[in-house]
Image: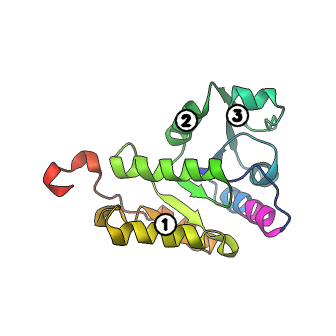
């Protein structure tokens, strides 16, 4: 993987574990020679992961909607900063520029990005790894819900391993690097659905 899109929050929670996680991710990516693709912001976890990559000598590509540039939250120190009309274009560019997706703690926007990456993988718009770093148990309930969707039958057996979950960053990055693409819905016939 040459570039990974990292999905994370623009907030700074009181517990320092979240900012520390973003910094750890940034240093790990740069240390492995993996460039960062992210939301282009300078605040919260987004800013922390970008700064950690930059401080370690890595490349950072930010993709930010015009409206957020106007709010002065854009990280102008990125290696490249792409300003796009809106969120749809932003997420499409994440997919086009990256070789995989890594979600760390975040809020509603982070969930939107994660689920779209999974949905697009199921369908066949991409066959890139989708990782979830479960820092301090932050995603325990989401993981439980994902398993519930599998057990009920809303996630097909051939798609249940699209989401790669781990609490250890090094293990997660290794698992993502060795991801085996799954059968996509686009490649399936109606009888298989």
Which sits earlier in the primary sequence, circle 1 or circle 2? 2
**Is any part of residue 127 visible from this angle?**
no
Image colouring: rainbow
Q: Secondary structure at mark 2?
A: helix
- Residues in magenta? 16-24
Judge by depth and name the residue closer to the eye, 124 or 80: 124
Judge by depth and name the residue closer to the eye, 122 or 58: 122
Q: Is residue 179 magenta?
A: no
Q: Is residue 117 left or right of residue 139?
A: left
Which sits earlier in the primary sequence, circle 2 or circle 3? 3
Check the image and name the residue furthest to the front: 152
Look at discs 3 and 1 and give the one toward the viewer: 1
| Picture coordinates of residue 191, whole percent (x, y) | 13, 54
Q: For the residues marked 3 and 1, what is the alpha-carbon distance in whole angstroms?
A: 28 Å
Q: Identify the disc placed on residue 80.
A: 3
- From the image, tell me which residue sits under label 1: 164
Q: For the residues marked 2 and 3, what is the alpha-carbon distance in whole angstroms?
A: 13 Å
Q: Secondary structure at mark 1?
A: strand
Q: For the residues marked 1 and 2, what is the alpha-carbon distance in whole angstroms?
A: 22 Å
Q: Are marks 3 and 1 in contact (CB under 8 Å)?
A: no
Q: Identify the disc placed on residue 77.
A: none
| Picture coordinates of residue 14, whole percent (x, y) | 86, 64
| Quarter of the image where the C terminus is located | bottom left
Q: Secondary structure at mark 3?
A: strand
């Amino acid at each position: 993987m040459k570039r990974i899109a990292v999905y994370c929050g623009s907030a700074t929670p009181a517990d320092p574990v979240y900012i520390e996680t973003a910094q750890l991710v940034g240093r790990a990516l740069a240390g492995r020679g993996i460039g960062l693709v992210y939301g282009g912001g300078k605040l919260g976890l987004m800013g922390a992961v970008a700064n950690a990559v930059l401080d370690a000598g890595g490349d950072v590509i930010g993709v930010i909607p015009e409206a957020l540039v106007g709010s002065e939250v854009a990280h102008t120190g990125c290696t490249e900063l792409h300003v796009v009309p809106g969120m749809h274009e932003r997420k499409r560019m994440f997919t086009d520029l990256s070789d995989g997706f890594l979600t760390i703690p975040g809020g509603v926007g982070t969930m939107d990005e994660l689920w779209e990456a999974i949905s697009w993988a199921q369908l066949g718009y991409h066959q890139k790894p989708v990782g979830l770093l479960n820092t301090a148990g932050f995603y325990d309930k989401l993981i439980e819900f994902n398993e519930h969707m599998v057990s009920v039958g809303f996630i097909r057996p051939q798609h249940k391993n699209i989401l790669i979950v781990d609490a250890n960053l090094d293990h997660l990055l290794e698992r993502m690097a060795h991801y085996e693409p799954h059968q996509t819905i686009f490649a399936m016939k109606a009888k298989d659905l």
